[in-house]
Image (spheres, coloured by chain):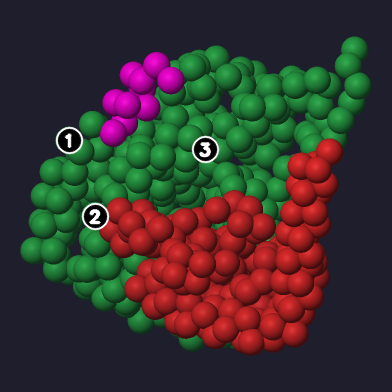
Amino acid sequence: MSAYVTKSPWVVHYDGSSCNGCDIEVLACLTPMYDVERFGIINCGNPKHADVFLVTGSVNEQNKGIVKQIYEQMPEPKVVVAVGICACSGGIFKDCYNVLGGVDQVIPVDAYVPGCAARPEAIIDAVVKGLGVLQAKRDAMLEQKPAEEAPAEEAVEETAEAVEEVKEEGGEE
Amino acid sequence: MGKRTIIPFGPQHPVLPEPIHLDLVLEDETVVEAIPSIGYIHRGLEKLCEIKDFNQMVYVIERICGICSFGHGWGAVASMEGAMGVQAPERAEYLRTILHELGRVHSHLLWLGLLADGFGFESLFNHCWRIRETVLDLFEKNTGGRVIFSICKVGGMRKDISNENLKEMKEVLEGLKAEIKEITDVFINDASVQNRMVGVGVLTKEEAEELCAVGPVARASGVPQDIRMTDNHGVYGKLGFEPVLEEAGDCMARTVVRIREVFQSIDLISAAIDQIPDGPVDMKVPNKIEGEYITRMEQPRGEAFYYAKGAGTKFLKRMRVRTPTNMNIPAMVKTLAGADLADVPMLVLTIDPCISCTER
Ligand code: SF4
């Protein structure tokens, strides 16, 4: 499984309170000039299908719930990339009354992309970095698993035995 | 009468690069009412004028929107220059006009792509964005930035663009025309595109006037409203500008207006490059700002309004911007009522919504 996910992660993009500059650069990564789609990196609209969460723009009172919600809807393991200086720290809008700051105020961020606007090369670079983090997170999850997984395997064996028994019984009848 | 259902649309939605939320009240498949709710992207940047001086404020205003960033920067600069009573050198005005029109080409191509994506024509989306990259390369070569340029300043331009570069820009754009035509012909002639857009979301001339629609939305309904005609900014008066008009008022007309404007902008750029005088691009301006001034600009999405009031120091007392999408939302809500649910993305997209402009 890891071979597929780490090479072709799906991303979901949400615009916090960005100026669009970074959003169109995120889209530019996907279109023919940079074309990350040829590696199978797809921008999907559904957080439940996504591995990487690209956030542009800072968070504010109105959207922080939504950022959190999207993050929670994504399956584990997941990686968050903050795109643009706004998403990193609030940037030029840091002092605005309606800006709480960077995205890391509400959700944990794994990679930061500097720049205003962030350049597509930098965004791609950060996503690639994020893949390393994704792999590490997956490994960590797998390491934790065995204790939990053991009963699951037993259960499978038990079911298999039960099936056999039923078959045998069926045969006898 | 069917049962009423409410479908939430946004703030995170595949066709929307930006967050806006609509509550769509449905009766079967028909939208009876659309209730917009905004505020997801509000930053409150106008208030920054209290802590950032007028030179810094230009960069803040430029970041209202990354798509028409040059236009916003210019609008802010024009209102501040007006308040100071200074006039930028002529070459600077020409350069501003050229870059502003180049921004329009980039914005409309971007929008055409998003529209194609909206009705599920992926390859068309990618072609539009491929062509747009050529325009971005021109920007990058001449200003240093791809989407945010920071080249416009009070009193002129931060740096000059050499005549050779301008000549090259003209050649590249003229060469691009054929490619753009190939793509835009698909929008106009393809049967599946026509099925999605012809006769959908009609806004009559009276409605457009009554709801104060601006920009391509108004012009697609036959309202000759374009601030570039008034010659209060740039050198449009010298370039023989005529607004692009369509009569039908449907989604197709709004698309055709923008397609024709792409070619018109390229012609305007070529004309400006032919006429551009030599000379300085920058001048000294006072270090404090007094008085107040209102200016209007034709952004790719329509009329924008800028108001600057100086505090007698290097700070502004008030900076106010009103952006085109703000004015087009009533028109959008009007066309949404009575539409099919499947047409909602088309209707939302054809006003070319720019939410970060609207909420600032
Ligand atoms: S970092 Fe700059 S370009 Fe990106 S969203 Fe913020 S202001 Fe816009």
Specify whether disc 2 shares its chain with disc 1. Answer: yes
Display colour for chain A: red
Given the image, what chain letter belongs to the residue carrying mark 3?
Answer: B
| Label 1 crowd bin: few (<14), some (14–19), many (20+), radius 10 Å | few
The N terminus of chain B sits in image quarter: top right
The residue beneath circle 2 is: B134
Q: Is residue B225 above or below residue B138?
A: above
Q: Is residue A62 magenta?
A: no
How would you rate the neighbour count of disc 3 (Cα within 10 Å): few for under 14, some for 14-19, many for 20 or more?
many
Q: Residue at x 48, y 28 (%)?
A: B254
Which mark, by number, is residue B118? 3
- What is chain B's hue in the picture? green
* 3D distance between C-alphas at marks 2 and 1: 13 Å
Spatial CA distance of label 1 from label 3 is 25 Å
Q: Earlier in the sequence, mark 2 or mark 1?
A: 2
Q: Earlier in the sequence, mark 2 or mark 3?
A: 3
Rendered image: mark on residue B178: 1
> What stretch of residues is rendered in magenta?
B183-192
Q: Position of residue A143 (x, y in %)?
A: 64, 87
Tag in front: 2 or 3: 3
